[in-house]
Image (tube, rainbow, N blue to C red):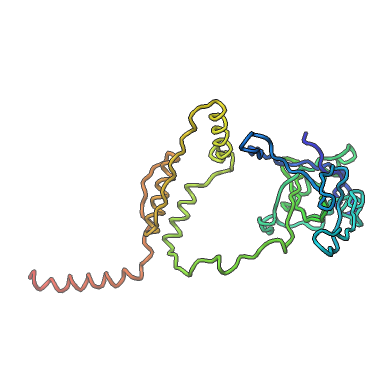
Amino acid sequence: MPRTIWSGAISFGLVSVPINVVSATEDHSIRFHQYHEGDGGRVRVRKFCELEDREVTQAEIGKGYELSRETKHAAAVIVPISDEELANLPLPTAKAIEIDAFVPLDSIDPLRIGEGYYLAPAQQVAAKPYKLLVQALGRSSKVAVAKYAWSGRERLGLLRVKDDVLVLHAMRWPDEIRRPTPEMLPDPVQVSDEEIDRALALMDTMSRDGLDDPEFADRYTDALAEIIKAKREEQPLPETPEPEQPVQVLDLMAALNASVEKAKTARGESADVHELPKKKAARKAPAKKTAAKKTTSRRPESA
């Protein structure tokens, strides 16, 4: 089991559920070190005191809030804050994850949802209230919105259920979300119903039941691992595939039809693309009247 990064309780009305928090995600990225190209020596970041101009140990380093500084080289006026003081903040959320409300998941902007953590019952006494909250959340089809205080700040959180385990997602406060600006919008254009229908057809060919398909694997990390292996074994580097050249879209409908055909071919389906019926009945009516007039005018000639 991953290491516990925080211990406390979930506060649900007058119900308290002791829990341990562990990370629900892993980072499999390949890490690099900085090194001196001349001799291969590691380049490290060292911590120096700017007044004494010497390296200091971790035991000598504390936290503090800087009030003022007369000059660049003068000692600043610091209000020291200890780890113990941070752990005992005068906040109810310093020791508990306090549930404030229950809301539909689709009412929350995904931009506000961040990293996830598993909440495990900390002791046997937590088993029943833990299961109660899991089953109640499952039946309600809602998620819980809570507040908690970790790492020097109070945060908003979202609680949901995954495989009978409670999951806490960190959330951003409303003022942390930037509003889109008018400059981000394209110039006004018209999109036809036929183009929307063909886009929906393309979306249908690209639909999946989930994200477990092999095509969603991390190809960047795999490619980087291939380069490292080739250099370690003094082999030629793998060839870089030529990217598809971007095509300037002059006919949007033709591009959509070609995209549908390509997607179907990739999935082994029939690649026949049929044009959708044109929704221009109002324009066809005058054409029929014209055709009728032409037929009438020809009858005297044939007679």
Locate the C terminus and report the quarter of the image it occupies.
bottom left
Q: Please give the name of the residue rendered at 65% of the width and 38% of the height, measured from the top-left corner.
A: 35
Q: Quadrant of residue 134?
A: top right
Marker count (numbered):
0
Q: Please give the name of the residue rendered at 31% of the width and 70% of the height, measured from the top-left corner.
A: 285
Q: Quadrant of residue 121?
A: top right
Q: Please give the name of the residue rendered at 39% of the width and 42% of the height, measured from the top-left corner.
A: 270
Please give left or right for residue 185 compared with residue 201 in the image.
right
Location of residue 61 with respect to 42 vertically, above or below: below
Q: Position of residue 288 (x, y in %)?
A: 26, 69
Please give left or right for residue 276 compared with residue 150 in the image.
left
Q: Position of residue 178 (x, y in %)?
A: 66, 63
Q: Position of residue 81 (x, y in %)?
A: 89, 54
Residue situated furthest top in the rendering: 233
Q: Position of residue 88 (x, y in %)?
A: 92, 52
Query: Is 144 in front, or is 20?
Result: 20
Location of residue 32 with respect to 257 vertically, above or below: above
Query: Is 124 in front, or is 285?
Result: 124
Please give left or right for residue 237 compared with residue 156 in the image.
left
Locate the N terminus and report the quarter of the image it occupies.
top right
Q: Please give the name of the residue rendered at 84% of the width and 51% of the height, measured from the top-left corner.
A: 97
